[in-house]
Image (spheres, helix red, strand yellow):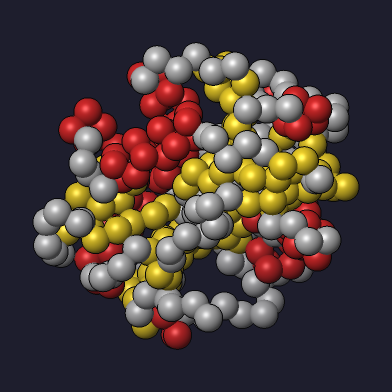
């Protein structure tokens, strides 16, 4: 059961969430010609009547970039302005998630991106922990991550998430919490909707962009934090066997934040996770605006 925020932005105006409805003939519904973003917000735990949004500018920039793949010019500044107004109108009182969405709104039946109407909406819902903070079990999916030569993986294109959906269901129905997808070269790519990190001998390792991963904003934040904390970091290909002998493994994403991996297939991972714990605590402090060194990552929205 989802608790949706009461107001949505739809067809260039703010309306009650229940009134934001699309035609069954909407082009994007049939062809996956849409792109989405996702960002978290929380009421400021230190100051009443304020909302904190994590890396709002980066989220808006990425959605604007995703829209370009759909032949849609949607400036990041416009997205940001609408999201700020959206938050002020909803006045959320608990942790929440915002879903901005760009799509081909035409009612035609030809799969295309030229000479077609586009639109943009925003809605939100209350959201606590997306995955268990105690850790998740993962299986190696039989489905492979798509390649950038067949899909624009630099954008969060909705049609691409059929693979994530297949992998997630396969994992859950076989007794696991989450899936890890390999790429076409047989290297570790990402989870169903999260990036992945490995710790070995004190070094933080994650697949690079050439491994067909999403350019995760939480991923970027973690790499920056690790370097600032003096943790050696490297972006390179990762083999499946390296996952199984890692000292620590964790997933990262806007919804997942930093989630430890406690099991991969039949291999139990160590419950001693010093680097994961350090990064998780640091990221939590930043999102709550308790770390002055990273205040530019947090947008403060007065209500």
Q: Residue at x 50, y 53 (%)?
A: 133
User: Along the line of sight, which residue is nearer the eye, 127 or 34?
Assistant: 127
36 or 26, nearer to the observer: 36
Q: Is residue 116 left or right of residue 257?
A: right
Percent coordinates x, y for residue 14 in the rendering: 33, 74
Relative side of 188 to 208, left or right: right
Q: Position of residue 5 (x, y in %)?
A: 37, 75
> Which x, y percent locates residue 128?
43, 63
* Image-based side of 51 in relation to 117, left or right: left
The count of marks equals 0
What is the residue that sits farthest to the right in this orientation? 142
Residue at coordinates 68% horizontally, 68% vertically from top-left?
Answer: 29
User: Height in image: 71 above or below 33?
Assistant: above
Q: In the image shown, does 132 or 128 lie closer to the viewer?
A: 132
Q: Position of residue 146 (x, y in %)?
A: 78, 40
Residue at image coords 22%, 28%: 293
Q: Residue at x 79, y 36 (%)?
A: 182
For the question of whether residue 291 can be seen, the reply is yes
Is any atom of residue 152 visible in this view? no
Establish if 208 lies above or below 283: above
């Amino acid at each position: 059961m989802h608790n949706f925020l009461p107001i949505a932005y739809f067809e260039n105006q703010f309306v009650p969430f229940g009134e934001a409805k699309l035609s069954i003939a909407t082009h994007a519904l049939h062809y996956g010609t849409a792109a989405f973003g996702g960002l978290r917000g929380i009421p400021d735990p230190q100051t009443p009547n304020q909302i904190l949004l994590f890396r709002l500018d980066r989220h808006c920039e990425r959605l604007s970039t995703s829209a370009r793949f759909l032949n849609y010019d949607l400036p990041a500044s416009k997205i940001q302005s609408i999201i700020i107004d959206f938050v002020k109108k909803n006045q959320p009182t608990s942790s929440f998630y915002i879903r901005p969405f760009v799509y081909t709104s035409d009612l035609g039946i030809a799969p295309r991106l030229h000479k077609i109407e586009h639109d943009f909406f925003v809605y939100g819902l209350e959201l606590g922990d997306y995955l268990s903070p105690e850790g998740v079990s993962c299986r190696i999916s039989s489905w492979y991550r798509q390649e950038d030569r067949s899909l624009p993986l630099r954008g969060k294109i909705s049609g691409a998430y059929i693979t994530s959906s297949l992998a997630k269901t396969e994992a859950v129905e076989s007794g696991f919490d989450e899936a890890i997808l390999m790429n076409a070269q047989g290297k570790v790519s990402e989870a169903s909707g999260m990036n992945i990190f490995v710790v070995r001998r004190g070094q933080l390792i994650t697949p690079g962009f050439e491994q067909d991963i999403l350019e995760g904003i939480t991923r970027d934040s973690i790499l920056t934090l690790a370097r600032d904390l003096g943790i050696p970091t490297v972006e390179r290909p990762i083999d499946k066997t390296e996952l199984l002998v890692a000292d620590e493994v964790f997933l990262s994403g806007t919804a997942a934040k930093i989630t430890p991996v406690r099991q991969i297939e039949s291999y139990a991972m160590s419950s001693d996770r010093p680097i994961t714990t350090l990064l998780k605590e640091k990221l939590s402090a930043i999102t709550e605006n308790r770390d002055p060194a990273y205040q530019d990552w947090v947008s403060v929205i007065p209500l």
